[in-house]
Image (cartoon, rainbow, N blue to C red):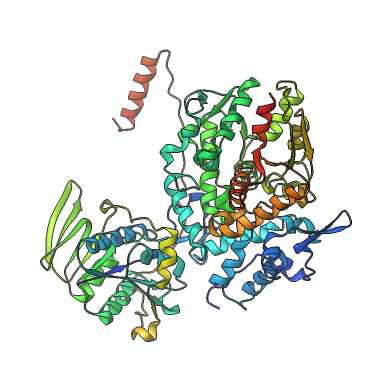
């Protein structure tokens, strides 16, 4: 075969151990079977699952198939949400998503990636962001906030907005609210404005590990120069990148990384922010994959709590809001249904991304929620678009918007 | 109609960070993880030159690439931005050729295509930086060439090019057919949108192996790679001392003079 790929021994052994039990396509929780894997449930064909992808990987390694456009198409339909890895009984393997990351890196090396991703990476290289927007406009979201610029002034805590919040104008209020809440609690805060760059996390998930390393090195160099020891971000992808991926690649050093939900939960616990106003609504919470199961394997891999999955802090925040009735969906925390935007799916297969979001919205409606609350800009974007497509019916909030309403 | 051929090499992204590169010294090969193949940047400049001519004159642009395991998805970018046809010379025999063998193979394909007016290449490939294939093709085909060009225009069967030199540029005119190697000063290749990339599937991609091309590349390499290594860089930092800023400045100047920098 001319363009097969070779896996390392560990990954190859995993592909041979998979007994095709199909457990990765659904889950068993609270005495009920639940559907967890978006690609399998959309296409209803085993190849579209972790087990199926493992069989593809084995066939590629053994030279029985080529890395063709059809194979690439299957690999890149996966939202990389990691639900499969929660269910798979493969106990010897710390992070089953490693297979997906490895295969995508090989797709990139072989020049076999979706066109949409090629265009996005070209934009990233030119303008340092994943949204193909001019880099000069990166700081516009913070205009008028008069927050410190860490490239010019010293600040204790750095707020990383992330590509989506910097360039998606509809989401600017979320990042602006986060900055205001942190300053209201007396945090000495700085941003990098137009000099902020992508964290590189999405590039990693698309298989462009070289680009990821470039951005990890650039970001850490900037933070080192600015003397930053603590980073807070509202972006779930950014949290995963800074906290887990930078660590895996030995780039993080002693940088402390917090997601805005855990930082705000701490500030409320310490009494530095006091939600007192009533926000009367019935709301449910959607767990972003990058705050949950995507960071869990790192804990198991290291044998100690290096990165904590963030399940409880957002729930604590919602429970601290007077008047808000917080209700849970069936599929939560490590068994949450993905929003559909992850792994580059929102860019390459937007119809599938919207279908996946639509499924989640229906689940939220089915338990009587008026609003679905999340803590990730990619989830919020995708839910917003899906709700628009289905002519409304459910409000979509980022958690900081509700915290602000309660103060 | 002006018949333009652009030679493009597929290389690993030269903008990947240094820490992504590893060397397998034994087999003298660069190992890169998660780094994509791309069109060599100077070759992109050459394609942009061709497209600018196409914008002004009725032209056909054929992109030609040689190698093994060429990525159609990567090379299709050339079709997406406006090239009319892609000709791939793909064969195990075309792997890891030196500059002479590459020029020989490309010139053979161009000769077989025939009817060309202008051949464009990048000034050099972004991986080897040898810069000899373009001139080699011109030599083998027996046509004039202009190297390291920043602007190309056609005028009444002639090509007028601005050639970059250290203190400016020269304006050179040659009759057609001729070959030009293009430099980055010409400008970046226009962007390809996803829509254009998808539409490029409808444009023709032709693949020839060595047999179809009708020639075998020269078996004896004119150049051999003796060793491959990453140079060791050593940075040393010395703090210049002094009681006052003026004294520190003066001490710095003395050190720079001692190092023969001032």
Name the image quarter holding residue A310: top right
Taking the spot 30% from the left edge, 33% from the top edge, the residue there is B260
Q: For this rendering, which residue is in front, B128 or A400?
A: A400
Q: For this rendering, which residue is in front, A407 or B114?
A: A407
Q: For this rendering, which residue is in front, A91 or A72?
A: A72
Taking the image as shown, residue B154 lies to the left or right of residue B46, namely left
Taking the spot 74% from the left edge, 71% from the top edge, the residue there is A16
Name the image quarter holding residue A194: top left
Query: Could you tell me which quadrant the N terminus of chain A lies in?
Result: bottom right
Taking the image as shown, residue A77 lies to the left or right of residue B15, namely right
Name the image quarter holding residue B84: bottom left
Image position, residue A42 (x, y; %): 67, 64
Taking the image as shown, residue A256 lies to the left or right of residue A110, namely right
Q: How many marks?
A: 0
Query: Could you tell me which quadrant the C terminus of chain A lies in?
Result: top right
Q: Among all residues in the image, which is located at the extreme top? A: B243
Image position, residue B255 (x, y; %): 36, 27
Residue B236 shows up from this direction:
no
Image position, residue A190 (x, y; %): 55, 27
In this rendering, the answer to whether A262 lies above or below A42 is above
Residue A333 shows up from this direction:
yes
In this rendering, the answer to whether A24 lies above or below B112 is above
Q: For this rendering, which residue is in front, A329 or B127?
A: A329
Image position, residue A145 (x, y; %): 51, 25
Taking the spot 64% from the left edge, 75% from the top edge, the residue there is A62
């Amino acid at each position: 075969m001319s363009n097969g790929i070779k896996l390392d021994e560990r990954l190859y052994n995993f592909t041979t151990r998979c007994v095709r039990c199909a457990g990765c396509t659904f889950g068993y929780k609270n005495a009920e079977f639940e559907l967890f894997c978006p690609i399998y449930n959309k296409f209803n064909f085993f190849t579209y699952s972790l087990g199926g992808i493992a069989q593809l990987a084995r066939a590629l390694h053994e030279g029985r198939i080529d890395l063709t456009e059809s194979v690439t198409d299957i690999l890149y339909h996966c939202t990389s949400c990691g639900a499969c890895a929660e269910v798979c009984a493969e106990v010897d393997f710390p992070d089953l998503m490693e297979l997906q990351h490895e295969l995508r890196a090989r797709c990139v090396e072989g020049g076999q990636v979706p066109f949409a991703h090629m265009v996005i990476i070209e934009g990233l290289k030119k303008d340092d962001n994943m949204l193909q927007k001019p880099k000069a406009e990166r700081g516009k979201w913070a205009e008028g906030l008069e927050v410190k610029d860490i490239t010019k002034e010293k600040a204790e805590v750095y707020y990383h907005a992330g590509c989506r919040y910097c360039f998606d104008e509809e989401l600017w209020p979320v990042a602006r609210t986060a900055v205001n809440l942190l300053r209201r609690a007396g945090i000495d805060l700085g941003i990098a404005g137009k000099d902020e760059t992508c964290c590189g996390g999405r590039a990693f998930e698309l298989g462009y590990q070289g680009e990821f390393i470039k951005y990890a090195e650039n970001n850490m160099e900037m933070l080192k120069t600015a003397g930053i020891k603590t980073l807070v971000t509202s972006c779930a992808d950014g949290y995963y990148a800074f906290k887990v991926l930078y660590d895996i690649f030995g780039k993080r050093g002693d940088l402390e990384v917090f997601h805005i939900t855990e930082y705000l939960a701490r500030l409320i616990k310490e009494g530095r922010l006091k939600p007192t106003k009533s926000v009367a609504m019935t709301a449910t919470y959607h767990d972003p994959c990058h705050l949950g199961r995507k960071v869990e394997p790192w804990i198991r891999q290291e044998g100690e709590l290096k990165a904590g999955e963030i399940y409880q802090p957002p729930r604590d925040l919602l429970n601290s809001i007077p008047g808000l009735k917080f209700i849970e969906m069936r599929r939560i925390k490590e068994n949450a249904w993905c929003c559909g935007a992850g792994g580059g799916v929102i860019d390459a297969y937007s119809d599938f991304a919207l279908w996946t979001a639509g499924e989640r919205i229906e689940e939220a409606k089915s338990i009587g929620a008026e609003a679905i609350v999340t803590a990730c800009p990619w989830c919020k974007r995708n839910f917003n678009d899906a709700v628009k497509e289905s002519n409304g019916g459910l409000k979509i909030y980022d958690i900081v918007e509700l915290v602000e309403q309660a103060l | 109609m002006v018949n333009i051929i652009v030679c493009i090499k597929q290389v690993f992204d030269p903008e990947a960070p240094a820490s992504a590169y590893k060397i397998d010294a034994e087999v003298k090969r660069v190992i890169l993880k998660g780094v994509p193949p791309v069109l060599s940047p100077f070759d992109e400049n050459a394609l942009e030159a061709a497209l600018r001519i196409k914008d002004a004159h009725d032209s056909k642009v054929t992109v030609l690439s040689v190698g093994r395991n060429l990525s159609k998805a990567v090379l299709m970018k050339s079709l997406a931005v406006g090239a009319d046809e892609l000709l791939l010379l793909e064969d195990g025999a075309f792997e890891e050729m030196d500059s002479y063998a590459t020029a020989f193979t490309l010139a053979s394909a161009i000769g077989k295509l025939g009817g060309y007016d202008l051949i464009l290449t990048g000034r050099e490939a972004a991986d080897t930086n040898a810069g000899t294939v373009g001139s080699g093709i011109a030599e083998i085909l027996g046509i004039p060439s202009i190297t390291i060009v920043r602007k190309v225009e056609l005028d009444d069967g002639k090509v007028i090019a601005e050639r970059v030199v250290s203190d400016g540029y020269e304006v050179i005119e040659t009759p057609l057919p001729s070959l030009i190697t293009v430099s980055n000063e010409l400008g970046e290749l226009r962007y390809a949108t996803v829509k254009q990339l998808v539409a490029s599937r409808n444009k023709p991609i032709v693949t020839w192996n060595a047999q179809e091309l009708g020639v075998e590349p020269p078996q004896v390499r004119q150049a051999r790679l003796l060793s491959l290594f990453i140079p060791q860089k050593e940075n040393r930092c010395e703090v210049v001392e002094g009681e006052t800023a003026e004294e520190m400045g003066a001490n710095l100047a003395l050190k720079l003079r001692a190092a023969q920098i001032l």
